[in-house]
Image: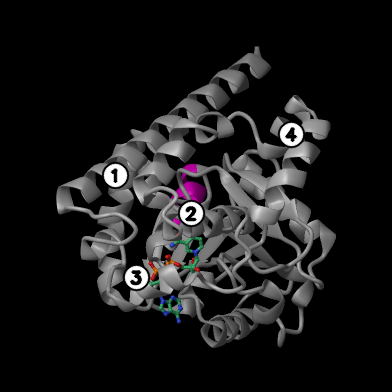
Amino acid sequence: MNEHTQLKIGVVGGGLMGHGIAYLFAAAGHHVNVFEPSSEVRSSLPRRLKAIVELLEDDPSLLQRIASHGSLDQAMNGADWVFEAAPEKLPLKQQIFAELEKLVAPSTVLASNSSAIPSTEIGRHLVHRERVVGTHFWNPPHLVPLVEVIQNEKTAGDVVQRTMELLRRAGKVPVHVRQDIPGFVGNRLQHAMKREAIALVAAGVCDAETIDIVVREGFGARTAVLGPMEQSDLVGLDLALDIAEVLYQHLDRTAGPHAFLRDKVKAGKLGMKTGEGLRKWTAQEADAVRTRLSRFLAEQAKARKKNAAHTGRERTL
Ligand SMILES: NC(=O)c1ccc[n+]([C@@H]2O[C@H](COP(=O)([O-])OP(=O)(O)OC[C@H]3O[C@@H](n4cnc5c(N)ncnc54)[C@H](O)[C@@H]3O)[C@@H](O)[C@H]2O)c1
């Protein structure tokens, strides 16, 4: 595969994640066929894709490389890679992969975007398990650079490497996760922090808004350019150890979800969609958060694209 190779990418499921995944591969020059069983979701696909073009100020002609289908058979015909973004249910994903195995070549890579289900389980009953791999994109997949490429116990090493190369060429930042563990890497880190945050609010140490300020205006302000491992090495592991000695014994170790979280859900306080979750939200406040996030991510994506184009031009000079 060189940078001009045009591949056929199959995407299973044209929902929230599927349409973004389709977009990013079409933007990278590939032909994308999306299988989406719901005619309603299928008919909303052009509008949702056009919104991304507008957000990223891309050339709308790239959308000509995306087709949607109501038949899996048609959509997967000749696919080089398949990315599955169907609902998060193991029996459904297993059934989809069994059908895929009958439709595509044995060499076609079958990647699942599951957030939590190990691809080991999704591919368990297949004949060619070496081409099944986890690819955990982050929402929205066309804006967030990271993709965790999860090698399960059967995944061939070259499938991981080729998938990472495909993603890299599409402008993503893939990382190799060597064990198919729940939460992979990103969600384990994210939820370790959320567990502590919820425990702090539940104990009355501070309110939920304060947690958000502490993260955004404190260590979050530098996290995009300084990861926690770099930060530990920067301050010195002797200090990291001294802090760990004092602090770790006090961190929350509730085994399951905190009762505070369970009670919120039981009371129907589900977050922005119900007007209250950990914080209270008017519809306008919720919209403002969505707009802030989408603008921020789009600006970052545009800056990365500009940078990549500039670096490419410098290389050819
Ligand atoms: N939403 C997120 O933030 C996020 C992030 C990372 C990974 N994921 C994972 O991505 C996958 C998709 O999530 P989503 O948020 O896009 O869900 P979604 O509900 O928006 O999209 C799923 C789509 O799959 C379609 N579908 C239903 N049955 C199908 C079938 N048999 N074959 C193919 N498609 C079918 C649905 O009609 C729907 O359009 C899930 O496994 C989820 O865990 C989601």
Q: Which residue is mark 2?
A: 200
Q: Earlier in the sequence, mark 1 or mark 2?
A: 2
Q: Which mark is residue 289?
A: 1
Snapshot quadrant of residue 163 = bottom right
Q: Earlier in the sequence, mark 4 or mark 3?
A: 4
Camera-side mark, 1 or 3: 3
Name the kind of residue labelled 3 in the image.
Answer: Lys
- Could you say where residue 223 lies in the image, as x and y percent from the top left? 57, 34
Marks 4/1: CA distance? 31 Å
Residue 1 can be seen in this image? no
Name the kind of residue labelled 4 in the image.
Answer: Ser
In screen coordinates, is 57 left or right of 214? Answer: left
Q: Which mark is residue 232?
A: 4
Residue 304 can be seen in this image? yes
Q: Tell me, what colour scheme is on the image?
A: one colour
In screen coordinates, is 177 left or right of 84? Answer: right
Snapshot quadrant of residue 275 = bottom left
Frontmost residue, 85 versus 194: 194
- Identify the element where label 3 is drawn: helix
Query: Mark 4 near ligand 1 (CB under 8 Å)?
Result: no
- Could you say where residue 88 lies in the image, as x and y percent from the top left? 49, 75
Residue at (82%, 65%) from the top-left corner?
156
Marks 1/2: CA distance? 23 Å
Marks 4/3: CA distance? 35 Å
Task: Write down the region rendered in magenta.
Answer: 21-27
Magenta-drawn stretch contains 26? yes
Frontmost residue, 181 versus 193: 193
Snapshot quadrant of residue 297 = top left
Whether label 4 touches label 2, CB < 8 Å: no
Q: Is residue 111 above or below residue 189?
A: below
